[in-house]
Amino acid sequence: MHEVTFEGFVRPDGRVGTRNHIGVFVVGNCGATAARRVADHFSAKRLAAFPNVNEVLPFVHEIGCGMEATGEPMNLLRRTIAGTIRNPNIAGAVVIALGCERNNIRAFFEQEQLVPGPMLHMLVMQEIGGTANTIAAGIAAVEAMLPEANRFRRQTVPVEHLVVGLQSAATDGDTALSANPALGAAIDLLVGHGGTAILSGTSELAPVAQRAVARASSPAVGAQLEQRIQWWKGYTAGRDTGMTRAASADEGAGLHRAGSSPLQAVYEYAHPVTQRGLVFMDAPAYAAVSATGQVASGANMVCLTTGSGSGFGAAPVPTVKLASNSAVFARMEDDLDIDCGGVLAGDIGVEQMGQLVFDRMLAHASGQATKSEELGVGRDEFVPWPIGVLA
């Protein structure tokens, strides 16, 4: 088998990014405006002197205060933020706090074993002297990081370094016939060459639990998946959710878009993915929350299938969107990357379409902008799972 490659950014620990960003994070919503102002300062004109840096991105969210200071909700939030900071697409980060959040910034750094340094800065608004001073300090911190981030240059790497989060949104009856199996064929190619794909959306697997568990590579992995499905049944009991209503017409859609490879490991939300091949990460079947967790787990690309059209994009990674039919692709061509309608029309087979999807994945991993990147989508799509609220 010949080696398949893409052009990526190799990090000191050997992981590979498909993009080269600097992130501006908040531990709680109180720092959101300062973080956005810092990121917005770095326009394309200001970044022109650093051609290897893609963007300075804000990572703001709406939790971190008004919640328990300990327990799984806080642990989940902290590992999501820390995992995103560690994503290979992030070359450096600034983390902003007001100073009195329940998600205390110093406790966050200590728990997640983050160490401030030249490429990781901690800013506390109440200590610096307010919003304006924090914005100025944040801009100065990013300016100091830009020369080092710019030292990274794309180089040829094996496709085994590609880690793809699998998503769907606004599906229709055609999705199971075209976009999902086409993506599944591409994922089989990726896994066959040593790459990794992360399947999520536990609640939508419940109607086909036996089929999902049968995909496990071992009884232990199957038991872990079954445990997560049972957890979801308890979590959603008595609630008006998709899991408690009648199953959709596209039962097992997640399995279709995951190809035919065995499931090698099961992870809880936002835990680091270390196993290669097809793996599962527990998450709601809601693209923004699910993809946020996958990126925190290490995904450097997201592929999303849709039937009615989706405007979603995950800012730190290229988000490749596949339309199930040509009508929606034509209607939302500014948002969608690949038209799988030819499969429905009989003009191309699923395996051929899968090869085309795989080739596009490599092109986007190597720097070709996706439609969501061209539109600047993703700055509001960092959504850590507010567990206990979102079903």
Image (cartoon, helix red, strand yellow):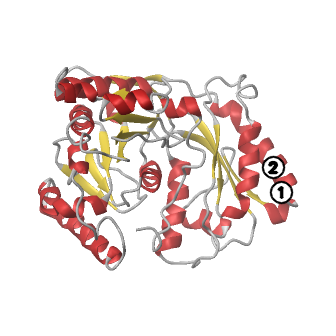
Q: Which one is in front, 212 or 176?
A: 176
**Callout 2: few (<14), some (14-19), or many (20+) C-alpha neighbours within 10 Å?**
many
Q: Where's the N terminus, which quadrant? A: top left
Q: Is residue 230 left or right of residue 35?
A: left
Q: Is residue 182 above or below residue 222?
A: above
Q: Is residue 114 left or right of residue 313?
A: right
Q: Residue at the location (56% across, 29% down)?
A: 374
Q: Quadrant of residue 315?
A: top right
Q: Is residue 379 above or below residue 2?
A: below
Task: Name the disc covering residue 218, or none.
Answer: none
Q: Quadrant of residue 109?
A: bottom right
**Mark 2 highlights which residue?**
135
Q: Which one is in front, 322 or 5?
A: 322
Q: Is residue 144 left or right of residue 266?
A: right
Q: Quadrant of residue 284?
A: bottom left
Q: Which one is in front, 114 or 162?
A: 162
User: Does the CB distance between marks 2 and 1 fall below 8 Å?
Assistant: yes
Helix, strand or loop under label 1: helix
Amino acid type of the residue that numbered disc 1 sits on in the rendered structure: Thr
Q: Label 2 to label 1, Cα distance in Å?
A: 6 Å
Q: Residue at the location (36% across, 72% down)?
A: 240
Amino acid type of the residue that numbered disc 2 sits on in the rendered structure: Ile
Residue 264 in sight: yes
**Mark 1 highlights which residue?**
131
